[in-house]
Structures are given as C-alpha cells and as structure tokens.
DNA sequence: CAAGTATATGAAAACGTTTGCGTAAATTTA
DNA sequence: TAAATTTACGCAAACGTTTTCATATACTTG
C-alpha cells in the first residue's frame, strides 16, 4: 500500500529527483535517453504524481469551486455537467457545493473554497443580494457568476438576456392571436425576475395590449408555487387565452392546476414557460418555452474565469447571451379577427 | 492580495508558528491568554489556514471523489446533492466527475482522483463490468459503489433490493386485478436489470401468471428507448392491461407512445416504473413507481466510506436497502372475476 | 526551600513536489 | 588545441502547515 514517490523513482533510476521531475514535465533540460529510461521506471513502479505536493509549490491547485443553490435542480445539474466536462478538458477539476438557497451558507462555503485554495470560483448565486454579502470574498479569488444578471456591478458574470427573451415570448403569443395574456409569477426579490417582467411589459407597450400580472410573493419559483397561484386564479372566471410564466417550474404547476380544473392545454389555454429545463421537453408536458443556452453559459463562464485566473488584473467583464424560442405543443393559434 | 500565512501571524504575535498552529487547533498545550491573543490577531489579519499545506503534512485531504455516469440525470443529481450536504457536515468536500457512461473515462477520472489524493471515492459505476476494470485502482483508495449490486464481489457497495422491489411492483399490479402484465425494458448487460427482471419472474411464478417480457437491446434505459419499444409494441393489437417498466425513464417514453396512439393511462392501460425519479411525481406524469431511498443510499454510502477511511483493513461490506411502493395515478384497478 | 512535576513555548523536521543556480562533461568555435 | 559555449544533471531552497522533542519557566509537594 505504500505510495511510490518521486524520491523512490529517483533512487531506483539512480538520478536526482529533480531529474525525474524534469523527465515527466517535458522539460528540455534533459537528455533524451535519460528521459526515456526514467519514464519507463515510473511506469514500472506505478508512480502517480502527488497533486497536493505539486499545488503546494506551484501555488495553483487546478481546482475550480462551483457553488450552486441546489444540484438537484435540472437547470443547475445540467450546467454542472457541462462545466465539469469542459473544465476537465482544460485540466481542472470541480469542487461542488450546495448553498441550499441560504445566503449564510453560500458565504460559508465560499470561504471554505478559498481555504482550499481553489484557483477560481463559479457560482449560481442565491440572488442579486449575494453581491453585497460576498464583496470582500470575491476580492480574494477570481469569481464568475452565472445566471443572475448583476447589471453594472463590478463583477464578472454571464447571463442570458432575460428581457429580450420574455419580450420574444410575449410577441410569439401575440403572433398566435393572443391579446389577453396573463404573466404569472413575477417576483420582487430577484433581478432576473425583474428583467423578465420588463420584457413582458415592453412587449405589451409595443403591441398595445394591456399587461396583466399575477405576482409571486414567495422567495422561489417552484412547481408548488405555480400550482397554487394558478389554482387560486382558476377559481374565478377568467378571460385570458394564454398564460406566460416567469419560469418553467411555475408552468408545470399551472399544468397541474389546469388539469384538475378540466382546462385543456393548449385547446382551452395556451401556456409558455422560460428556461427550457429538461422536464419541459417530456412528451406529457411538451412545454413551449424560452431556452437558456446552458452549454454556452457554461463554456463562457469557464472561459471568462480561466482568463481572470491568468490575468487577475483584467477589468470585470459580462457576457449576455441570447435566449431562443423553443416551440412545442402548449400553445395554439386562436382566431382574432 | 498577498495571502497571510501562519508565519505572518506568528511574527505579528511575537510567537513561534507552532504556537499559532496550536492556538487554532484547540490543543491543550497552550496558555489560555496566548490562545486568545493569537486568535484575535488571526481574525484581525484575516488569516485562513491553507488546506493544501495542511493536507501535505496530515496526509489527508478531507476531499472525497464522486464519480457518476452523468450529473444531469435526476437520480444522480439527487444523490449528489444528498452526498454533498452530508459530506460537508462530516468535514469533507466533494470533487465531482462525470464518467459519461464511458468505462475508459471512468477509469481515467478514477486515476485522476487518486492523484489528487482524495481520501476516498464514491462511485455510481457505468456497469457491473466496472469492477474488473477498476480492480487495481480500488486497491489504492477506499471506494464505495452506489446503486449497482456487485453481488459477492469483494467490493463495498450500497444498493437497493432490486428483486424485492420489482416483485412488490408486480404483486401490486396483480392486486389491482391485472393478470396480463408486460415487463418492458429488461437489459442483459446490467446486473441491476437482471435482478429486477428476477423480481418480476419470481412474482409471476408465485402468482401463477404468465411472464411476458419485452427486452431492451440497447445499452441504456432512456426515455427515447422506452418510446421506441412501446411504439413498436403498440403497432399490433395487444392484450396486456398493464406495463411494468424496468426504469422510470422507460415509463415516460411509454407515456409518450401511448399518448400518440390515443391510449389513455390509466384508463386503458396501467403503467408502473422503478426508481422514483423527480420527474415521475410531476402532475402530468404522476407515475406509480418503486422508490429508491436516495437519501438513505447517500448516507449509508458515505458512512461506509468514512468507516473504511478510518479502518482500511475492515473486510468489505455491502448494504442492501429496501425499496418501497409509491402509488400515484398511473394504475387502476380492473374487474377480474 | 530543594527537588520534582506540570505547563507553556520554541526549534526543527517532515510532507512531495518544482525550479533557480551551480558545475562537470560534452560540444562547438577560432 | 585552448577557449568558449552548450548540454545534462545534481543540490538545495521553497511552498505552509503539523507535530515531536527539547527546554525554560512556573507550580507543587514534603
């Protein structure tokens, strides 16, 4: 069980351990014959370099920390998968932490990762307020935020153009003939949600239709919340021909409430979401929605982080990606003339 | 940006760095007054211990490696979330890697984690054959497998009693009056699937009904595969009143195929799955299924691993947990007399 | 109060690498 | 062929901790 180290190899090969190190690192300061001989011995002895010791001297761990609110959330887990695969290709490993939607915990795991000397941190923050809480911490290690739009704050982030996406969604419904569109699930405590609502309002103004918003006063957008909001709404008679949700999860809750009321989608009511989580593609759901390009978000975020790791002095950058419409079967055209 | 180290603190405090170390580690070999003073200075200077350096001397990283086939799979991501939270409570961080269902990659990331000097590895293997491929590697670091039943192989694993679960599912359908039950999706290359099929056969024998199996010849159980199998099956007239699927994903594919054929679930056909992935609870799906207790699997696996880390000489252990029926709305009772 | 014991602290080794510097041998140049 | 240059390698420091051992001081005890 004794682990074989550089020194062991050096002893067997009859060279100094500097030579072994150089043989392995591909340094030019070494003779070709010795290199081959040393490498052969390394293989025979089953030598694996100790990454911890290397980190110690190189002052670099090749680990990047990832903080997400909750891994078991389709959006996050998909992002995580993309990030892990791409990071590994770039020579980095991922240390993953859940913040569990708790700002205090978010701060705690951030410190933990700093102590671990990760080379950088990518995080999907609990909310925009994370910025203030983490201001001192993000100064200690290169950090990139994903998903949450930090506006003009001096932070690095990559996000989707939430406003344009929601505007596009509204216009799509309009193009199908809908004039009475309920916007369901606007939240006040999230910049992302504010921006999405803006998109809806913009479209309404442009298309000259009356905005109609059902707010979500809770802190999260979950299936449960969508269900409750819709259920209450369906109690009274309503005149909307379409519901546009601030998130896919909400839309799935609406489906449930509609089902219970005998309201058919899309025959009786058109429905749209936002995010394009994996669920939404499933045949029994088949939700028309706005896609967040998760792979591109992941790749951009990592590229941005790697850049900052190389050149920490670079000014902060933001990348805003374009969302796109994903048309499935939850909306139908209605006569409108 | 200069990071403050133990030595810096020692210099300011006017003590040796051994003393600082002791003050922080809660060693009793230190005067109460110095301890307080040192700790205060640490806080003032914003000192964070360097985990890498500590790992170096302690020969322990407090990192555990997690290898999953694919993070963006509801079963895995839920397990990962449980594992991360519990591991952190135990003082460990998680380094997560995707094997992407590729045995070669699985082997590669395993070595990578060994080089990282993780204290232990938890893995959801690509398949039972992973055992042979990794035999030499699992000898290098404490390893626990999750999900896949390794039978009597000398490995540590925690799994669910797949046979009992599927038997229970079959019996449930029987109790609802079903006598003609199609078992859909049996795979040959997976021990887990073999055991599940065994459960179905056992029940059939016990209940004296004729087994009826539709095999899956591909390597994975996906929604797509379920859809294709069911679609082909539905082309000809069939007499089954219920379909029991080897996995929830398959069942969701069946729902799609049924929907397209105008077959209503559960009115025309009862349907069951296995795993209880998050999807299955969603209202438009509402699948009756067999639950794998994911939290318990995660906790048992980590406990088992931590034990082996403490006492590597312990003989191999296996834990088999009990699955349980989750009754939702995809099955109905039929007259049978 | 002397001798012994307990307590608080410092010095230094160790963990396994990478790398700057020095130098002997090999090669080139004049 | 002597001098200059290049090449190949070894030595040892450094990275930031923890911990063993030694030791000086303070406290106990008879």
Image (cartoon, coloured by chain):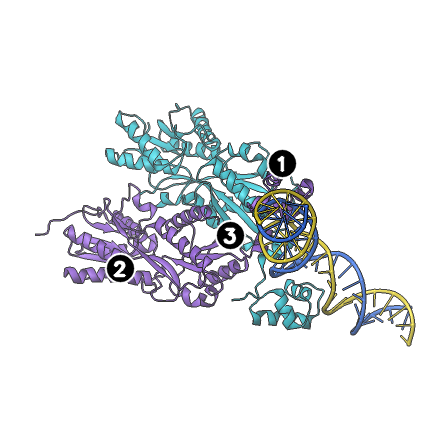
Chain colours: A cyan, B purple, C blue, D yellow
- Is the residue A175 above or below the residue A121 in the image? above
In the figure, residue C17 lies in which quadrant? bottom right
Residue B62 circle label: 3
Residue lying farthest to the left in this orientation: B337
Q: Residues within 10 Å of mark 2 (few under 14, many from 20)?
A: many
Judging from the image, mark 2 belongs to the subunit labelled B
Q: Residues within 10 Å of mark 1 (few under 14, many from 20)?
A: few
How far apart, in angstroms, are the residues tagged by discs 1 and 3? Answer: 27 Å
Residue B163 circle label: 2
Residue in front for this viewpoint, D4 or B222: D4
What residue lies at 59% left-to-right and 62% top-to-bottom? Answer: A49
Judging from the image, mark 3 belongs to the subunit labelled B
Judging from the image, mark 1 belongs to the subunit labelled B
Left/right placement of residue C9 relative to residue B253 reads right
- Is the residue B311 above or below the residue A228 in the image? below
Pair 2/3: label in front: 3
Q: Position of residue A140 (x, y in %)?
A: 61, 41
Label 1: element kind: helix
Residue in front for this viewpoint, A234 or A131: A131
Q: Position of residue B113 (x, y in %)?
A: 51, 58
User: Which residue is the site of mark 1?
Assistant: B44
């Amino acid at each position: 069980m004794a682990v074989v180290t550089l020194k062991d190899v050096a002893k067997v090969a009859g060279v100094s351990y500097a030579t072994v190190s150089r043989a392995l690192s591909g340094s030019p300061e070494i003779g070709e014959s010795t290199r081959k001989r040393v490498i052969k011995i390394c293989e025979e002895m089953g030598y694996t370099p100790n990454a911890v010791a290397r980190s110690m001297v190189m002052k670099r761990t090749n680990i990047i920390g990832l903080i997400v609110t909750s891994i078991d959330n389709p959006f996050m887990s998909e992002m995580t998968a993309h990030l892990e695969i791409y990071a590994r290709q770039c020579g980095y490993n991922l240390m993953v932490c859940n913040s569990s939607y708790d700002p205090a915990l978010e701060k705690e795991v951030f410190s933990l990762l700093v102590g671990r000397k990760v080379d950088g941190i990518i995080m999907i923050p609990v909310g925009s307020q994370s910025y203030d809480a983490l201001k001192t911490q993000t100064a200690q290690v290169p950090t990139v935020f994903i998903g949450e739009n930090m506006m003009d704050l001096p932070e690095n982030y990559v996000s989707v153009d939430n406003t344009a996406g929601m505007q596009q969604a509204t216009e799509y419904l309009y193009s199908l003939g809908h004039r009475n569109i309920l916007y369901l699930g606007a939240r006040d405590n999230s910049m992302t949600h504010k921006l999405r609502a803006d998109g809806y309002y913009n479209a309404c103004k442009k298309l000259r239709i009356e905005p109609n918003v059902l707010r979500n006063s809770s802190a999260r957008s979950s299936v449960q919340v969508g269900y409750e909001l819709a259920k209450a709404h369906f109690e009274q008679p309503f005149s909307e021909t379409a519901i546009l949700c601030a998130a896919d999860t909400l839309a799935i809750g609406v489906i449930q409430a509609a089902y219970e009321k005998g309201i058919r989608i899309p025959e009786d009511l058109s429905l749209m979401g936002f995010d394009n989580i994996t669920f939404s593609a499933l045949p029994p759901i088949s939700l028309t929605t706005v896609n967040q390009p998760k792979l591109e978000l992941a790749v951009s975020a990592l590229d941005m982080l790697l850049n900052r790791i190389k050149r920490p002095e670079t000014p902060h950058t933001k990348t805003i990606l374009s969302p796109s419409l994903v048309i499935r079967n939850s909306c139908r055209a209605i006569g409108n003339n």
